[in-house]
Image (spheres, rainbow, N blue to C red):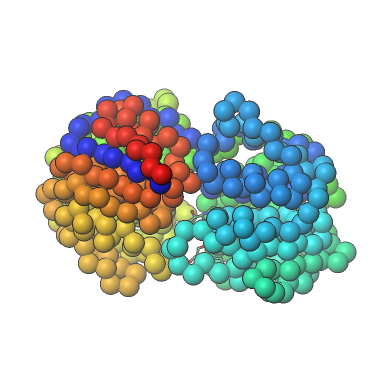
Amino acid sequence: MDSIVVKGGRPLQGQISIAGAKNAALALMPATLLSEEPLTLTNAPRLSDIKTMTALLQSLGVEVTSMQDGKVQVLSSHDMTSTTADYEIVRKMRASNLVLGPLLARHHQAIVSLPGGCAIGARPMDIHVTALEAMGAQIELRDGYLHAKAPGGLKGARVPLRFASVGATENILMAATLAKGTTILENAAREPEIVDLARCLRSMGAQIEGEGTSTITIQGVDRLGAATHPVVTDRIELGTYMLAPVFCGGEVECLGGRMDLVESFAERLDAAGVDVTETPNGLKVKRRGDRPRAVDVVTEPFPGFPTDLQAQMMAMLCLAEGTSVLEEKIFENRFMHAPELVRMGANIEVHGGHATVHGVEKLKGAPVMATDLRASVSLILAGLAAEGETIVNRVYHLDRGYEHVEDKLGGVGAQIERVTGV
Ligand code: UD1
């Protein structure tokens, strides 16, 4: 298995191009199941999660053509052969559950394995299931699979979500485009990836209003057509690279970065003594002093501070002046990076959903283990500041969500390399 080796202490200078959003692409790709006509996605990220979604869609009979080194994906569902999403693929990635809504909507049936994904909490499917049932689906759990059918098709309904789940909002949004009548999705998630999905569905002919707010109204149509859609910028990759110069000094411009995607995160950075400025091409970041200042962080659904940037922010706060408290309100078990950061000299106490970080002046390089996607990149960031060499082992999680991390950080002056293992 590959490792990433980082030697800390070098200030960074230059530009990093931010890719299209993994989480947007993982919802946009299954949208192809709603139409016989091709869906072309541009600005797609080159990631192993995208390959997993490709394999899943291909197992259903979708034709996927990858062009321009993976940046353009053309998907065509004109000749589907299956409506069963097999455990062997679904277990690799929770977002596989996003085929459920579209399959039910167009084929009136689906058998979808319960998903796996990062080990960051229980992550059940009850919100998706309750919402689809409200639209007339009959769903049973048998042998680890959700067996769903909607004889005669899904029907528009009032669908209140008990929690603003991102995946459930995406599944219902897609399902409702082909349902009979009007669906009013209440307490919908407001993430930019949902806005992006709604825009793409609208280009395919869907009638949707209210994306980006808590109430989305979808008027079902008989069929959807072809579309070409550019994937929105990855705000989590953006936030991750915005932090890089805070660890070791210098100034980095994140190309394609937009303030509206990272508002609450940028606000916390400002409070921590980090300057974020908008440029014609993106966002430029530089820390004001030698060390950041302690700040408290609470993760919340968008527009709150994203849980997917919590690990990276914690790594930064390990080096801050003062004591910070991080509260994780989205996933109950998302502090697995804390013990690894402690191995690098950090001072962190975890109590349930809270972590208290007492800032230290220095971190020291160590062999550490990546336990989930965002945890692994937080250890690489910590390595940028640490004295000596940090070896981040088991980086397959990293490759799920960051394309060419060693090239992007190496390109702005970091000493970082990938060591290919057995
Ligand atoms: C998506 C993102 C993930 C991000 C998360 C929260 C993708 C591919 N992944 O995941 O990177 O961390 O949003 O911003 O877009 N829940 C239930 N029942 C359900 C569904 C969810 O209890 O039926 C709970 C989960 O266990 C979790 C919380 O709701 O505690 C948030 O989950 P959700 O918003 O659904 O996240 P995902 O769509 O899985």
> Does the image show residue 224?
no
Q: Position of residue 389 (x, y in %)?
A: 20, 42
Q: Which quarter of the figure has residue 14?
A: top left
Residue drawn 27% across the image and 65% down it: 355
Image-quadrant location for residue 109: bottom right
**Residue occupying the far front of the picture:** 422
- Which of 186/315 is in front? 315
Q: x%, y% of residue 208?
A: 70, 49
Name the residue located 11 percent from the left edge and 49 percent from the top edge. 361
Asked if residue 114 is positioned above or below residue 282 in the image, the reply reads: below
Side (left or right) of 377 relative to 181: left
Q: Residue at x 41, y 44 (%)?
A: 422
Residue 385 is left or right of residue 78, and the answer is left
Q: Nearer the viewer, residue 270 or 321?
A: 321
Is residue 290 visible in the rendered image? The answer is yes
Residue sitting at x 59%, y 47%: 52
